[in-house]
Image (tube, grey):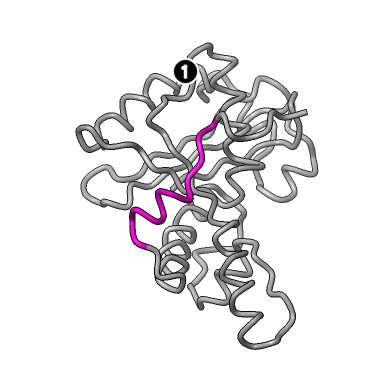
Amino acid sequence: MLRLLVFFHKDHRIIEFALRDLSGGKNCTFETLINPERNVPQVVEAVTKIGTDLVCRPDIPRFSDILPILLAYVRSHQAPGKPVVWVAHNAKNFDVPFLAQEFDRCSPEIPADWFFVDSMSLARKLVKSEVKLAGEKRRLVNLEALRKHYEIRSIDNAHRAMRDVTILCQVIQKITFDLQLTYEELRNESIRASDCRKLS
């Protein structure tokens, strides 16, 4: 599971990164604030409670600082010969393009064996089939609406990356159950970073 907190266009940067390995075990989470090396817009601070004073400090790592650590962490959790399958809510239009942009800044490409599943796309498929069956209005597919739909307890109200990852871990399991997706079918829903549009 992957969640990034970022600004909103190509000149903006990631300010928080969180992931959880659904296999569990020791050290199954990875999270960090990230120094964007620029001011955090007030609108972002209002939503995330992460402001310039919190992240633009010398003790907060830049993305280029955490990238080698992130790659080593993922490799240490990767099953030999198997791809890494990331799940992110709105992966195709948000998380993956921003992640690719940060990788581009640091020069390495996103590993070819990393695949991304967009849980928002899966939620849309689920809602479409439910609407056909029930004849009801379209249900929202944002993460908070899905949390409420599945009656998942909220950790707190802050829009922070690890909170969203924790909720997404539960949401994706419920969506895949409702859609009756096997691992292989879920993997077939995945995209590569190169399948995503560049930020403009």
Q: Which residue is mark 1?
A: 65
How many badges with numbers are in the image? 1
Give yes or no for residue 187 being in the magenta stretch. yes
Q: Which residues are magenta?
A: 182-193
Q: Is residue 116 left or right of residue 140?
A: left
Q: Nearer the viewer, residue 56 or 67?
A: 67
Residue 21 part of the magenta segment: no
SS state under label 1: helix
Q: Examine the rendered structure and indicate whether residue 148 appears above or below residue 111.
A: below
Q: Which image quadrant: the C terminus?
A: top right
* Residue at screen point 57% across, 36% down: 96
Towards the viewer: 148 or 41: 148
Q: Is residue 121 left or right of residue 177?
A: right
Assess disc 1: are there few (<14), some (14-19) or many (≥20) residues with their C-alpha within 10 Å of its C-alpha: few
The answer to whether residue 165 is left or right of residue 142 is: left
Q: Quadrant of residue 103?
A: top right
At x 41%, y 33%, the residue is 114
Give the x, y percent position of residue 42.
79, 40
Q: Residue 73, image x and y in percent?
A: 31, 30
Q: Which of the 4 quarters of the picture holds residue 36?
A: top right
Residue, far top: 107
Relative to 56, does residue 141 appear above or below in the rendering?
below
Q: Residue at x 34, y 61 (%)?
A: 182
Work out whether residue 137 or residue 151 is closer to the camera in this orientation and state it: 137
Q: Position of residue 63 (x, y in %)?
A: 53, 23
Residue 191 spot, x, y in % from top left: 51, 40
Which residue is painted at 39% across and 56% down in the image?
Answer: 185
Residue 192's place in the image compared with 147, above or below, is above
User: As rendered, which of 122 and 26 lies closer to the eye?
Assistant: 122
What is the three-letter code of the residue carrying label 1?
Asp
